[in-house]
Image: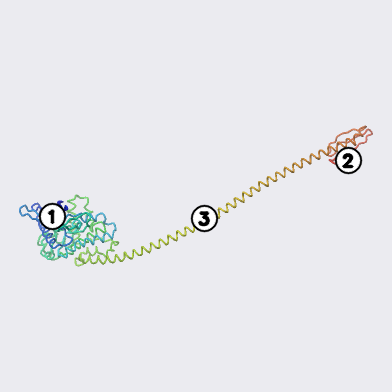
Amino acid sequence: VFHAFEQHDNSPKRCMALKVVDLEKIEHKQRNQATNEAKILGELNEKKVERIPKLFEIEQHPTNKTISMVMELAHHDLFDEITPHMGQGKHEWVRNTFKEILQAINPLHKMGFVHGDLKPENMAYFRAPRVINDQHFPTKDDPLVLKVIDFGGVMKKQDLPKACGEIVTGTVMYMSPEQVAWCAAHDEEEFLARRKQVPLSTKSDTWSAGVILYQMLHGKSPYYWITKKYEHLDEEERGEKADAELRQTIFDGKKPIEFDEKYQDLPLLEIRCLARNPDDRPEIEQLLHEMDKLGYRVEQLEGKIEKLEEEAEDLREEKEEREEEKERDEEEKKKEEDDEKYEEEEREDEEHRLAEERKVKQAQENARLQQEARFRYEQEMARRRQAQQANLQFFWNNFLGGMNNGYGFFPLGKKGILMRMFCSKGDSLSLQYTPNTITILL
């Protein structure tokens, strides 16, 4: 496949894909598939079937045995689209993508065709083009639309009962049990017997779509343990052994597919798509109808959920307002308590300060009173000393002065006895005094 473009005069450049198949360089079965693809794609474009790549030109050269097809260029395939999101629990994305897949397959089925090789690599996104003079000119601003590609194994439903083994193909990982039975035939006789025993139909594409759904939900294939078992081998050997075991496992169904209960909220679509009996599988159109009903129910649920979320948000806001009001009340109460405590501390500090001032003043007053008392005491003592001295002076001057003759004076140690006087005749007397009086003792 080549990337080509076409441009005429002043018209916009048109990008296209050029697919060239050299029939002489491929095997007989592949030649049949290439011829079948050119025929089917041409027929589908003539009938303007939706979700089919636009075929601009097709040529088959009898001389050099080549088939050339010029068709619209894909933007990217489904594999690149789903790989980053697989197994991440994005249910809304899975639901929308699976519906796109069904919408891409359904027009083919409605026209009476079975694809036979549906897988992420065989579905691609194309730009929905502008139409200028019947010419298609997609731009980067155009929306992406999912379409089915690779029509080598496509068959008409009426041709299935007479199909030969060379035209039936597919990728083992995405094959239905009946398709595996057809492809596993060793010769044409066995193929005819299985074709009669296990009919092939559009339900085989339903199985393939179920495998893609399983991959999107679980992030792995339904038979992941088989590919993991041979991952240590080189690519060629791994492919041969894994494909052989895959065919046997899908064909006999002895090891059932494991489903995770948490993914069964998609009305068991994957389980129904992967039913071993084709009669138990729904048609693609039926799946779309169920997806629409599911979407309606989901929209209803989403509406209820949105309403509940709004109510929950209102309750959260009310709760937050109550909590904020409570916090404000607590802050105000705490502020009041702090203010009261501060005022109380201020009062206590003031009382303490006043008490200290009173203590200081009292101490100063006591000191002053003590000083005054000491001063008065000293004055009194001085006065008394002066009086005593005056009394003694008076005594000497008025009493003892005339009695000095014939007397001797001897000081005594007794308290209050000033002296004892002795006269020549042997008589004696004692003088006792206080600050105010002098007493003569005979």
Residue 169 quadrant: bottom left
Q: Earlier in the sequence, mark 1 or mark 2?
A: 1
Residue on which disc 2 sits: 439
> Whole-percent x and y of residue 317?
41, 61
Q: Amino acid at mark 1?
A: Val
At x 25% / y 58%, what residue is drawn?
A: 216
Instruction: Decide: is 345 above or below 319.
Output: above
Local SS, label 2: strand
Circle 1 crowding by C-alpha within 10 Å: few under 14, some 14–19, many from 20: many
Local SS, label 3: helix
Q: CA distance from mark 2 to mark 3?
A: 86 Å
Q: State the quadrant of the C terminus.
A: top right
Residue 285 quadrant: bottom left
Q: Position of 290 compared to 71: left or right?
A: right
Circle 2 crowding by C-alpha within 10 Å: few under 14, some 14–19, many from 20: few
| Name of the residue lying farthest toward the front | 10
Q: Amino acid at mark 3?
A: Lys
> Whole-percent x and y of residue 324?
45, 58
Q: CA distance from mark 1 to mark 3?
A: 83 Å
Q: Earlier in the sequence, mark 2 or mark 3?
A: 3
Q: Amino acid at mark 2?
A: Thr
Residue on which disc 3 sits: 335
Q: 275 and 40: which one is in front? A: 40
Q: Earlier in the sequence, mark 1 or mark 3?
A: 1
Q: Position of 344 compared to 281: left or right?
A: right
Residue on which disc 1 sits: 70
At x 54% / y 54%, what residue is drawn?
A: 339
